[in-house]
Image: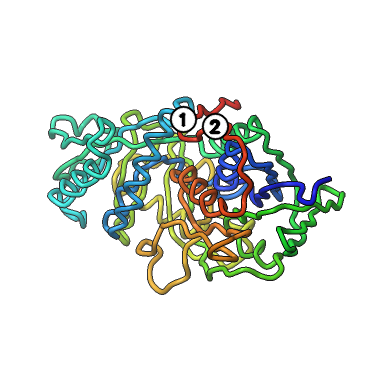
Amino acid sequence: MSANDYDLLVIGGGIHGAGVAQAAAADGQRTLLLEARKPAAGTSSRSSKLIHGGLRYLESLHLGLVAESLREREILLEIAPHLVRLVNFHIPVYKETSRRPWQLQVGLGLYAALGRFRPSTRFERLPADDWENLDGIKTDGLEAVFRYSDGQTDDARLVRSVLSSAEELGCEVRYPAELLSAVRERDGWLIRYRCEEELIELRTQTLVNAAGPWVEHVRRRVSPIPEGRAVDLVAGAHLELKGTLERGIYYTEAPRDHRAVFCMPWKDRILLGTTERTHRAEPGQVTATPEEQDYLLETYAHYFSDTPEVLDSWAGLRVLPRAEGEAFHRSRETLLFRDDAQLPRYIGIYGGKLTGYRATAERVLRALSPVLPVRPLLADTATLKLPDVD
């Protein structure tokens, strides 16, 4: 064995861990990923299944995030057409809707500009004659309907595909594997972890904490404990309803608090979500509460006349910086925390979006480049086609 068994060790098998593992393997680095349960077992299988440019983040002026998301969406449409597809999104505007038609017109125009006016960023205002064909949405008080395009995916399948690509490039993946400790040494880390009943020890030059909602749990197992960030785990509940939507996705506004709620076709069902509720219990214990289910059904009933049966409910967790006020107004930027500003050997990933996983992985590799060995480049993740694992 060499002094260091691996160049880079990733903790976490969600979309960001998979993305970092793929980027590192594509860079020729000897890479290992450890996942405590199974890939995409947490948030990365419990999202709203959208690869979107972040239209709603324009309100909070996260223009850089929107531009990055639109760019990454285009890349994913090219490298994973079997996983990511453009879908029509409809925004109905009623008399009581808080955002006026002119505001949406301006916002969609800015959205198109940030997307460099690509064909996929075009939008239109539907004539009133078309409203009756929109899956039965209520037309009383309806003033306008805007249509634009954004992406939809199978989030868990995307994670498995990225991870499979990483393995094809030479990355090793082990699960269920629980990190027990990471102790700093002169040129890296001494790692101890448990895989099933076996205790294993290895060395790695760099360590990436991509544990998502468990990011702080993992950080506290690192010695010395690196810098982190106080976070809130924000639950987002979803309902799966009996029925279908033929015309695409509906971007609605919850009548109770004006939050965005999506009504989406999903595997011969209607997927309805999401909510924002601070979760205080263990990350693995998150579920959709009765109150959240009532909130989502109330929103659906505000726009559609039918009352479909609830077939399933579930929830995922977002990692957001701890702050006062509503979660909607907090930054969605991905934060990277390093143990050393110049020569980092540990990086913790806080937050992040499904759409931007590849860009986040590139940032992580750039940050670690001063200490990683220079090895032959194997691939460029911006052009490497993702495999169809299913």
Q: Is residue 390 above or below residue 66?
A: above
Which residue is more in the foreground, 142 or 369?
369
SS at badge 1: loop
Q: Is residue 129 above or below residue 90?
A: above
Which residue is more in the foreground, 248 or 117?
117
Q: Quadrant of residue 112?
A: top left
Q: Is residue 199 left or right of residue 229?
A: right
The amino acid type of the residue labelled 1 equals Thr
Q: Is residue 8 left or right of residue 292?
A: right
- Quadrant where the N terminus sits is top right
SS at badge 2: loop
Q: How many marks?
A: 2
Q: Name the residue rendered at 41%, 34% in the picture.
A: 75
The x, y position of residue 159, in whole percent, is 57, 39
Q: Are marks 2 and 1 in contact (CB under 8 Å)?
A: yes
In the displayed orientation, state which residue is furthest to the front.
Answer: 374
The amino acid type of the residue labelled 2 equals Ala
The x, y position of residue 158, in whole percent, is 53, 35
Q: Name the residue rendered at 52%, 54% in the picture.
A: 367
Residue on which disc 1 sits: 383
Spatial distance from mark 2 to mark 1, Cα to Cα? 8 Å
- Give the crowd class for mark 1: few <14, some 14-19, many >=20 residues within 10 Å: few
The circle on residue 206 is: none
- Give the crowd class for mark 2: few <14, some 14-19, many >=20 residues within 10 Å: some
Q: Name the residue rendered at 50%, 27% in the picture.
A: 385
Q: Specify the color scheme.
A: rainbow
The x, y position of residue 169, in whole percent, is 63, 32
- Quadrant where the C terminus sits is top right
Q: Name the residue rendered at 77%, 58% in the picture.
A: 190
The x, y position of residue 225, in whole percent, is 66, 70
Residue on which disc 2 sits: 379
Q: Quadrant of residue 333?
A: bottom left
